[in-house]
Image (cartoon, rainbow, N blue to C red):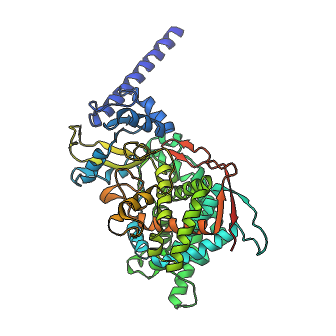
């Protein structure tokens, strides 16, 4: 009897192995033939699954080592869903930019195994808010004064200000959520304490969370169920219910024509007065606002899914990390504050607060761009899928259906593209601008665009590159600069030991260390 059981078990093991090998072989045949592309890791298809699993855990490190080994050649890495071709070197990146829509698609990689949620009305919302960003500056300034005073009260006149230790992530999420809420729903609801608290809690959860390895291993059919049970989705549902009630009240006020209601240039006020949104239900408007709060500042980059977070995760994640990186670098190098403060005060004295005035602050712009270069909130950029065989000038041919991307951190840290690329140099780009154009030319005027925060190039891919670069970058950059200017102008910031804490590796990203405190004190009025 035991012999029969052993024989039956052996048969089942053999059949299972045969079925598994058949499935793997079938999957391999369905994928583009990339055997001619060098592999960083195990070249065999079956063994590549072990590499794919480690890529989920330490993908950024593998990308860096792969680029160090193969640059400027093209190579591939294994992910849990497919081979991913990594493009290196400025020449190859430039060829991606010049490729036609018939050759490379930017849309297809956002479906299937790769994910970048783009809500239905996001493009219209981004376009409107970008066009009216100048009108937002007074409201954003008012909100920043309010929230900064709440977090760090000013010292009474005649008393010396004391340093106050703050949880860095709590401070970052408080500032970013208050700013985004002010843009989307206006002053009254932004300062509704329950909504403000839940917004900040959601942002903090997204900031410190990392993509779930378990969810990435699940079949697609189970991912929606897994996502629906996530804490982020639970928080989102509560916020949506609160927002629906507020929208109903706003509609009633709007229908009555109450001119005493504070309105301002917000996304909600625009949606309530624009004909194209008349057919939308309150629930749909609320969902659009929540989605905009996330994707409006999203630098479209497609990473193996934080799909458990849904759309709500990505942009609070990225925008908060951009501000966090700038804050951390400022706290680690407070010497940069004095020149920036001098520049800010000089511009404001001449022009007061305006879009053009902020664009003249070259040192602020440079500091933020350098922070984004060094502290990458996303690791893959210029993600494309071949619609037909695509051949680079060096003869490398990629078959139809190949997904390819540029690894952002290795490109930003390439010594062939930057001098001392591993060192943070806050005024790197303002200095380059002055060397080419002199100190008098306005940032953004003529050739000065090259070194501007919103400019894209083969050596700066934080926003993507080419015609499909992030459309929200102009608005995001203006909001980020407005926040940073208020902080630099009115507060001193530092780490207790003067050193930026090591970032925390998280798969395809390095996150600003969430377990640190920063010291802040108000400057004399």
Of residues 395 and 192, the one drawn nearer to the viewer in this rendering: 395
Task: Give me the residue at 31% from left, 57% from top.
Answer: 466
Relative to 509, is 390 on the left or the right? left
Q: Is residue 517 placed above or below 136 in the rendered structure? A: above
Pick whichever, 426 or 23, lies toward us: 426
State whether residue 351 is above or below residue 511: below
In the rendered structure, the answer to whether residue 159 lies left or right of residue 65 reads right
Q: Position of residue 5 (x, y in %)?
A: 51, 14
In this view, which residue lies farthest toward the right?
159
x and y percent of residue 244 in the render? 55, 72
Decide if residue 491 is in sight here. Answer: yes
x, y percentage for residue 324? Answer: 57, 56
Q: In the rendered image, is residue 240 in sight?
A: no
Please state which of residues 219 and 170 is positioned toward the viewer in this rendering: 170
Which quadrant of the rendered structure holds the C terminus? Answer: bottom right
Report the front residue among 473 and 264: 473
Expressed as whole percent of the image width and height from the top left, the position of residue 14 reads: 41, 18
Report the number of discs.
0
Q: Say which residue appears at 30% left-offset and 59% top-offset.
A: 467
Horizontal placement of 421 versus 406: left or right? right
């Amino acid at each position: 009897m035991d012999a029969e059981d052993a024989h039956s078990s052996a048969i089942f093991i053999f059949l299972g192995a045969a079925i598994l090998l058949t499935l793997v072989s079938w999957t391999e045949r369905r994928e583009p033939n990339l055997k001619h592309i060098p592999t960083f890791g195990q070249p065999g298809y079956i063994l590549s699954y072990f590499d794919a699993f480690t890529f989920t855990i330490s993908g950024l490190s593998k990308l860096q080592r792969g680029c160090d080994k193969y640059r400027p050649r093209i190579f591939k890495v294994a992910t849990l869903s497919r081979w991913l071709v990594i493009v290196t070197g400025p020449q190859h990146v430039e060829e991606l930019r010049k490729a036609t829509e018939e050759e490379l698609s930017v849309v297809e990689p956002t479906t299937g195994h790769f994910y970048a949620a783009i809500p239905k009305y996001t493009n219209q919302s981004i376009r409107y808010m970008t066009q009216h960003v100048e009108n937002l500056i007074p409201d954003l300034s008012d909100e920043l004064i309010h929230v900064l005073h709440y977090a760090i009260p000013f010292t009474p006149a005649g008393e010396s200000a004391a340093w106050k230790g703050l949880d860095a992530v709590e401070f970052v999420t408080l500032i970013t959520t208050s700013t985004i809420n002010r843009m989307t729903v206006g002053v009254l609801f932004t300062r509704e304490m329950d909504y403000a608290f839940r917004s900040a809690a959601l942002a903090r959860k997204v900031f410190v969370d990392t993509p779930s390895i378990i969810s990435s291993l699940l079949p697609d059919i189970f991912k929606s169920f897994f996502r629906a049970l996530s804490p982020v989705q639970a928080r989102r549902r509560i916020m949506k219910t609160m927002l629906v009630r507020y929208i109903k009240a706003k509609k009633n006020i709007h229908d009555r024509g109450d001119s005493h209601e504070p309105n301002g240039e917000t996304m909600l006020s625009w949606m309530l007065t624009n004909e194209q949104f008349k057919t939308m239900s309150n629930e749909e408007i609320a969902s659009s606002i929540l989605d905009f709060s996330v994707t409006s500042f999203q630098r479209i980059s497609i990473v193996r899914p934080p799909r458990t977070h849904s759309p709500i995760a990505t942009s609070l994640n990225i925008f908060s990390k951009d501000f966090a990186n700038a804050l951390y670098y400022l706290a680690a190098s407070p010497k940069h504050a004095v020149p920036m403060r001098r520049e800010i005060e000089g511009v404001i004295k001449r022009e007061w607060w305006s879009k053009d005035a902020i664009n003249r602050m070259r040192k602020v712009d440079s500091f933020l761009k350098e922070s984004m270069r060094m502290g990458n909130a996303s690791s893959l950029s210029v993600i494309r899928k071949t619609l037909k065989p695509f051949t680079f000038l060096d003869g490398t041919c990629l078959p139809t259906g190949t997904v390819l991307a540029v690894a952002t951190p290795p490109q930003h840290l390439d010594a062939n593209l930057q001098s001392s690329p591993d060192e943070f140099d806050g005024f790197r780009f303002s200095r380059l601008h002055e060397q080419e154009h002199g100190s008098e030319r306005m940032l953004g005027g003529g050739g000065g665009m090259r070194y501007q925060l919103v400019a894209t190039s083969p050596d700066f891919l934080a926003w993507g590159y080419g015609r499909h670069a992030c459309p929200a970058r102009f608005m995001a950059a203006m909001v980020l600069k407005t926040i940073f200017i208020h902080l630099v102008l009115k507060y001193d910031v530092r780490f207790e030991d003067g050193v930026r804490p090591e970032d925390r590796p998280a798969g395809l990203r390095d996150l600003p260390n969430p377990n640190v405190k920063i010291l802040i004190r108000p400057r004399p009025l």
